[in-house]
Amino acid sequence: MPPVQADLLLPCGVTLHGRLFKGAMSEGLGDRAGAPRPELGRLYARWARSGIGLLITGNVMIAARALGEPGNVILEDDRHLAAFHDWAVRGQRDGTQVWVQLNHPGKQAPRGLNAETVAPSALPFPGAMGRAFATPRALTREEIHGLSGRFAASARLAQRAGFGGVQLHAAHGYLLSQFLSPRHNVRQDEYGGSPENRRRFLLETFAAVRAAVGPRFPVSVKLNSSDFVRGGLSEEESLEVVRTLGEAGCDLIEISGGTYEKPMMMLGRGERGGFFADFSRRARALAGVPVGVTGGFRDADVIREALDSGAADLIGLGRPLAVDPDFAGRVLRGETLPRLARPGRTGVRAVDRSGSFDTLWHEDALRRHSRGQPVRPDENMRLALLRILASTGVQAALRQRRA
């Protein structure tokens, strides 16, 4: 069997069909109460029809008081469990699994979105991004323990709703990632200082989630290969986190990289072979559990080469699935595919310089697919910008993050 079609047995005993998965993308399809809108079920059913084995949701926030962007879905109690169940059922057809990505933004939340911003330490966001994010309050030990419990409670709710697994988002500069980073975590207690202390919150949260859902329910972690900023999480420390997660019994470690200071998950490096494939190969040798890698895989031949070379056990796809929901199915069927086009420039200097339009366009593509509308990366991008602003509103568009 070609590697891309081969099944993968996870440590918990669950089998994934095929070696492709959808990495998390922000859909912005939560309603005003944080419930998943019906469009999410339709969108995930569309992806499931392609035959892909695993779909990881976009950010699902563990608390209404800790949002990362407008349109976030929130899973903190059972008020909207029926809507979550519909999403799970519609996305899990013909062997496809849907895992809920659980997240807390920490200080990486736009100003004015939350009543209060919290983080490991009361440090403002460095550089120009400091204008977009409020200076946080440092969490107390008791609050840190409570947040581990909050992640666990949300994981249990996802299990009750019928999803196939959960993923803890410890990448891209969100709260779990902030604790790992010496750039953002300067605490002097047992949650800061040494690398062992800085990864304590992640490991305690993983243990709490595992206790809440049991040994047979998949629990994954998304982790940066590096933060790619001075003083951030290094590759050497990240490999130690990989090793400890493997020892803790993580079912799948997904490798990405970068933060909103330097969004390598979007900009990448070594794009021909995937942005983080070299690191994921090193991580796979240490982990003792399956490793997936996401970022820069827009070419079917590159996907197959990465699997053949042992770069990862699974390859994550993001924006190719926003352009073509059947992209994974075509790769699985062995089709020869042209490299997918990316949206062009709008011609509006401020928009094109900011780098935000690419994200806004792909989020709009997800909404269009959920409504059965066509998506064309060769469309007039100035007209596309007007359409997006009319749909989301100017203020909501300005609050969207860059990846």
Image (tube, rainbow, N blue to C red):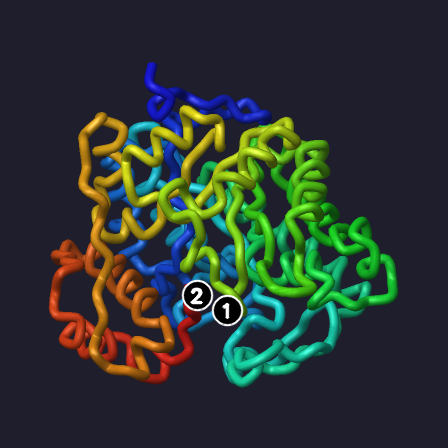
Which quadrant would residue 289 be assigned to in this image? top right
Looking at the image, which is closer to me, 27 or 308?
A: 308
Residue 68, numbered circle: 1
Residue 319 percent location from the top left of the image: 31, 52
> Which of the numbered marks, if any, corresponds to residue 124?
none
Name the residue: 56% across, 41% down.
279
In the image, residue 314 above or below residue 148: above
Q: Is residue 131 above or below residue 244?
A: below
- The image quarter containing residue 115 is bottom right
On the rendered structure, is 93 left or right of 169? left
Mark 2 vs mark 1, foreground winner is: 1
Q: Is residue 114 visible?
A: yes
Kindly indicate whether the residue at mark 1 contacts the one at mark 2 (C-beta within 8 angstroms).
yes
How far apart marks 2 and 1 lie (CA) works out to 7 Å
Q: Is residue 1 left or right of residue 239?
A: left
Q: Is residue 187 above or below residue 11?
A: below
The local secondary structure at tag 1 comes to: loop
Name the amino acid type tagged 2. Asn
- Total number of numbered discs in the rendering: 2
Residue at the spot 41% in from the left edge and 24% down from the top edge: 308
Question: Residue at 38% of width from left, 21% of height from top?
Answer: 3
At label 2, counting other C-alpha atoms closer than 10 Å, the crowd grade (few under 14, some 14-19, many 20 or more) is many
Q: Quadrant of the C terminus?
A: bottom left
Q: Amino acid at mark 1?
A: Gly
**Viewer-nearest residue: 291 or 104:** 291
State the mark number for residue 72.
2
At 24% across and 57% down in the image, what residue appears? 342
Percent of width and height locating residue 241: 69, 44
The image shows residue 101 at horizontal and vertical percentages of 50, 50
Confirm whether residue 76 shows in the render.
Answer: no
Q: Is residue 106 left or right of residue 264?
A: right
Q: What secondary structure is marked by label 2?
A: loop
